[in-house]
Amino acid sequence: MDPEAFLDLANQVVKLKMFPYFDIAHSVLCALHVREDLGPGAQAFSRKHPMSCWLSTMLVVFAGGMLCNGLLGEPVLAPLKNTQQLAVATVVWYVIFYTPFDIGYKAAKFLPIKIVFSAMKEIYRCKKVYDGVTHAAKLYPNAYIIMILIGTLKGNGAGFTKLFERLIRGVWTPTAMEFMQPSFPTKACIVASVIFVLDKKTDLISAPHALVYFGIVIFFVYFKLSSLLLGIHDPFVPFENLFCALFLGGIWDALAKLFGRGGNKDEKADAKKKD
Amino acid sequence: MDPEAFLDLANQVVKLKMFPYFDIAHSVLCALHVREDLGPGAQAFSRKHPMSCWLSTMLVVFAGGMLCNGLLGEPVLAPLKNTQQLAVATVVWYVIFYTPFDIGYKAAKFLPIKIVFSAMKEIYRCKKVYDGVTHAAKLYPNAYIIMILIGTLKGNGAGFTKLFERLIRGVWTPTAMEFMQPSFPTKACIVASVIFVLDKKTDLISAPHALVYFGIVIFFVYFKLSSLLLGIHDPFVPFENLFCALFLGGIWDALAKLFGRGGNKDEKADAKKKD
Amino acid sequence: MDPEAFLDLANQVVKLKMFPYFDIAHSVLCALHVREDLGPGAQAFSRKHPMSCWLSTMLVVFAGGMLCNGLLGEPVLAPLKNTQQLAVATVVWYVIFYTPFDIGYKAAKFLPIKIVFSAMKEIYRCKKVYDGVTHAAKLYPNAYIIMILIGTLKGNGAGFTKLFERLIRGVWTPTAMEFMQPSFPTKACIVASVIFVLDKKTDLISAPHALVYFGIVIFFVYFKLSSLLLGIHDPFVPFENLFCALFLGGIWDALAKLFGRGGNKDEKADAKKKD
């Protein structure tokens, strides 16, 4: 491919207008997520508790914005002030849950449609991560951790509000904490945030910004599609294992075990006491 | 009744000063609510955990203000800065929980007193809904949903903070989520907020503002008293059922069932798998 | 001791620089607290969920600041913007959880080291209570309750965020509410906040500010050390019992019981109904 044309394409991706098509794709997948999270009783629940159903869907759709606003001392409800986005999300919620003969839900679950929407959602996600990092960098120009945190939360807010979203529906699952077992989107958002921070704040990345952005979009879409089509769920696992072995005790623990002493002693003693 | 005199009365209700009598009525009913929520062990609890008891009562008394401040990015603690209101609430809490021979509690539960206080609380509630809508409209002039949300939360904040109020007392009841089964005050506050928004933002309501306000006050007081005296708990139910049948799947679900196919198929399949 | 020299010493304590030594002491004790809260499975947990472990440790280290910011409408994440403090806390977390053969943890638990760190943490705590009271007094010059609340929360934030800290680790213990059974540090922070408020806002305390501050530091350190070395856990208990007997129903309840009537009647009736 011609590099000039490639850069042109990248520039167009950066400037892509999100409303309304990408918002629709995002809302559809969020509503599907809520419906699938409800399990086989989803339809019955949506008939009995429409308000709770609507609120938890809205919380998922606007999760990133609300969460980041809450953490940055801005109004939590502010994302709802965009009436157009809210109307789109409400219509999508209605279509997914209440269309006659469940046409809306079935159409959204139809694989080709789902693939297109998923790809669009990943493009949207990339924009949100970038916006989050930029916003945090404006507020705290030297706080890299805050930039990465806000980028990650804006990119995958729904993962972190899962507990509250379920609570609105009267279900409480404290062990479903995203920090315990970060999902692939969370890890991808962390990596993307780190790259955006490096791009913004250091000279380590010499490529033009549009290329970096486009690269992350491709990375997001590629792994989403391979997860949907090929069942590859987490390409980060080998790197994590290496990192844990080197820095988070893996090797030392093995050594300590080998010599039959060291860090685990206390635990053994504690365990014995309990017996 | 003379219309002129009626309008005069309405204008007086609009300008009614709330402090201190209406604050006392509100605090008394809040403290009663906490005490009744504690069940038969209320007295023992209040002796063993006075701090937790005081804090959860204050949370109920100032629930609406705190909740709305939290959602609008304003200081959550700000409602406590009004030292006079706080003092009134604390005295009321003390009287309800700790007077010798439980005189305070018994007096507050005495039906005629409770009726007067309930009526006053509804007048106060109407003012809070109106203040909430006005405040939200100032911040987000075009976000109708935010106005309705804030109006509702300010009017019936205690319903929505019930989970946290109980958490302060060490009790966790995730299924007691107000959104799941909205109580009558919540629904009434939603209706009142919608009417205030229509009155403020559109020309649909041609009556003078004072009359609209007075009408809502009467509506609140009337249904509170009929709930207290006659046991009528929720006059909205028939309208809700109609709305659900028309728009939230009721009719279509019935049709689908009739033809033995449609939306419930997946669920049946899922249910079968489980067997 | 020469009073002049004593005042000089007090003045020096007031102006003590906290970073980095006091921050290190504070972080070490916070990380130890997290590790001990995890129980015998701490090492295994830190290997399996490093992210959740890091986040909950950071939450404990910066608990006071985050909590108070959240309640005062300031950005919750702001305490993390101090990159140096964050780096210190992260290094300490790493040393406590991941050093080979658990050297870091064992060293930190070594009594003489723990005593020194505990004393330093109490000096730090006093500064935080004072800063909290001052900050709240700037925002709300007449709201004594807010000053006391913020002082207490800033001084012993970790006690109040325990629920959330555990939630990040996937554990939910709603009954471990600090307000239910306030621990000694909480009570000490309340007393210190009250004294600082009296010192700031009234003329009741005629001693110079440095002396008041120094007195509280000594009080904090003294009781922390006596708790560590002598096992005296709560010197407030007799005063509390007296207060409860006089004002929170103790005497009246006893009288009522004596005469076989009064406040407990309803409860007995309720209890009977249940049988």
Image (cartoon, coloured by chain):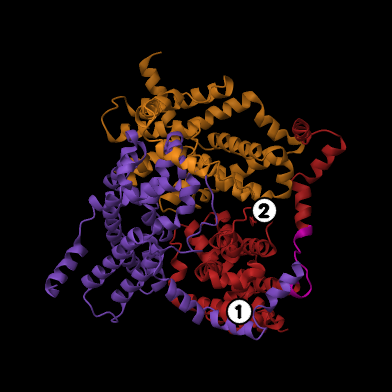
Chain colours: A purple, B orange, C red
Residue in the foreground of this view, choosing between C162 and A2: A2
Q: Which chain carries label 1?
A: C
From the viewer's perspective, tell me whether residue B66 is left or right of residue A111. Answer: right
Crowding around mark 1 (Cα neighbors within 10 Å: few <14, some 14 to 19, many 20+) is: some
From the viewer's perspective, tell me whether residue C217 is left or right of residue A59. Answer: right
Using the image, determine if residue A14 lies above or below residue C254.
Answer: below
Magenta span has B179? no
Using the image, determine if residue C130 lies above or below residue B184.
Answer: below
- Residue B83: give x, y in percent of width and height: 55, 48
Q: Mark 2 lies on which chain?
A: C
Residue appearing at x 34%, y 58% in the figure = A228
Residue appearing at x 24%, y 68% in the figure = A214
Q: Distance between the residues labelled 2 and 1?
A: 34 Å
Q: Mark 1 points at which residue?
A: C13
Residue appearing at x 72%, y 33% in the figure = B103
Instruction: Find the magenta span and give its range.
Output: C227-238
Instruction: Tell me the quarter of the image containing the C terminus of chain C.
Output: top right
Q: What residue type is labelled 1?
A: Val
Q: Mark 2 points at which residue?
A: C180
- Residue C35: give x, y in percent of width and height: 62, 71
Residue in the foreground of this view, choosing between A148 and B109: A148
